[in-house]
């Protein structure tokens, strides 16, 4: 199943940002090495500013494939599949899979279940993993909703084991790409890379700056190929969840892949796109899905509670909301001047 790219890296020189400024102007200029691969059900673009770019991209690709094997619910031999078929038995997993699950469960607790990785049976019911889309009956949805409960996931820090009740299944689709992109950034930095940008579909992580200048990252407007906003950043993580990543149309109505764990239906929060900007890509990945499901008011309430990220939200009425931490690094493209922009300041 093909996933549309939400974030495009714009390779042009950026002006200095007050918030995410690059101070290392004397950084030695290096030619980028670019590699494109398909993994995690998306196109991944690696751009590494280092003379060892080819070698490091191979190292990165191997690691991505290794982690996908562990974390994909669609790979029968993987650790997530083992958990899903465990019949309530504890399954020992790698530290990678364990940490992703723990991260997701923490965001689930913080967001009152707006993110819930046990929603997988419903995602399958709608046909999103396979592309065999259909609108299920209310009875089918209600039956599977009985097994959706993030609090039923049991973890044991002593032996890194995980168990779920019989009938409950997990999917790390809202967390794995974030974790893996964090992991690849760490891998490259440990190998001396000082400048890189890694695009995992709707997830972008950056290392350092682009030859001493900020990166300029475009955020795509849903159901188009245009960037409506540009973020001027140095090292950070930018993750978007949007209604046009995966969707189908039946009887003139669109159904997207972001399932509300409380209803079993595609989220009807009024939002069509949520972009989260923060240091941790796995947190941004989990949170972008959760905020999308929560809707504008609850998302802003969450932001005011934790204040550990920035966001951009679009609703179906062309309203854009973004946090005050982005006011010096966010610009709106002229073609999208019709958007009604509101700055959200932390309480």
Image: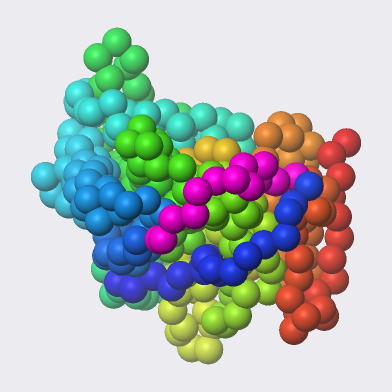
**Image height of 318 relative to 314, above or below:** below
For image coordinates 25% across by 56% down, the residue present is 54
The residue lying furthest to the top in this view is 158
* Percent position of residue 280, x then y: 53, 38
For image coordinates 18% across by 34% down, the residue present is 86
187 or 166, nearer to the observer:
187
**Image height of 204 relative to 219, above or below:** above
**Image height of 211 relative to 116, above or below:** below
Q: Is residue 199 left or right of residue 311?
A: left
For the C terminus, the image quarter is top right
For image coordinates 48% across by 61% down, the residue present is 202
For the N terminus, the image quarter is bottom left
**Image height of 94 relative to 226, above or below:** above
Q: Is residue 313 visible?
A: no
Q: Is residue 77 left or right of residue 167?
A: left
* Percent position of residue 297, x then y: 78, 50
Residue range in magenta is: 19-32
Quadrant of the rendered structure where residue 303 is? top right
Colour convention: rainbow
332 or 307, nearer to the observer:
332
132 or 308, nearer to the observer:
308
Q: Is residue 77 left or right of residue 120?
A: left
Let me know if residue 200 is in the magenta part. Answer: no
* Percent position of residue 139, x then y: 41, 61
The residue lying furthest to the bottom in this view is 252
For image coordinates 32% across by 28% down, the residue present is 98
* Percent position of residue 91, x then y: 20, 26
Is the magenta region chiefly helix, strand or loop?
loop
């Amino acid at each position: 199943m093909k996933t549309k790219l939400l974030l495009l890296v714009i390779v042009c020189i950026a002006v200095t940002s007050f918030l995410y400024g690059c101070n290392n102007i004397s950084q030695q200029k290096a030619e980028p090495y670019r590699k494109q691969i398909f993994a995690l059900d998306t196109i991944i673009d690696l751009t590494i500013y280092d003379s060892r770019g080819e070698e490091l991209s191979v190292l990165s690709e191997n690691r991505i494939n290794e982690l996908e094997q562990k974390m994909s619910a669609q790979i029968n031999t993987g650790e997530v599949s083992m958990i899903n078929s465990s019949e309530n038995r504890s399954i020992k997993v790698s530290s990678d899979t364990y940490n992703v699950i723990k991260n997701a469960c923490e965001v689930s607790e913080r967001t009152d279940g707006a993110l819930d990785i046990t929603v997988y049976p419903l995602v399958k019911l709608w046909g999103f993993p396979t592309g065999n889309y259909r609108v299920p009956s209310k009875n089918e949805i209600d039956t599977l909703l009985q097994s959706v409960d993030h609090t039923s996931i049991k973890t044991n820090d002593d032996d890194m084991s995980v168990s779920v009740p019989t009938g409950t299944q997990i999917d790390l689709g809202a967390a794995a790409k974030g974790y893996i992109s964090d992991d690849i950034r760490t891998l490259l930095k440990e190998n001396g890379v000082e400048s890189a940008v890694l695009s995992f579909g709707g997830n972008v992580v950056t290392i350092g700056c682009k030859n001493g200048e900020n990166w300029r990252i475009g955020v795509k407007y849903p159901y188009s190929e245009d960037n409506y906003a540009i973020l001027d950043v140095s090292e950070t993580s930018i993750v978007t969840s949007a209604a046009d990543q995966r969707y189908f149309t039946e009887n003139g109505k669109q159904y997207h892949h972001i399932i509300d764990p409380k209803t079993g239906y595609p989220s009807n929060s009024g939002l069509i796109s949520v972009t989260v900007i923060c240091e941790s890509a796995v947190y941004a990945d989990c949170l972008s899905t959760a905020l999308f499901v929560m809707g504008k008011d609850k998302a802003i309430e969450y932001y005011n509670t934790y204040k550990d990220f920035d966001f951009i939200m679009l609703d179906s009425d062309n309203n854009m909301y973004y946090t005050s931490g982005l006011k010096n690094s966010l610009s709106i493209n002229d073609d999208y001047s019709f958007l009604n922009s509101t700055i959200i300041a932390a309480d």
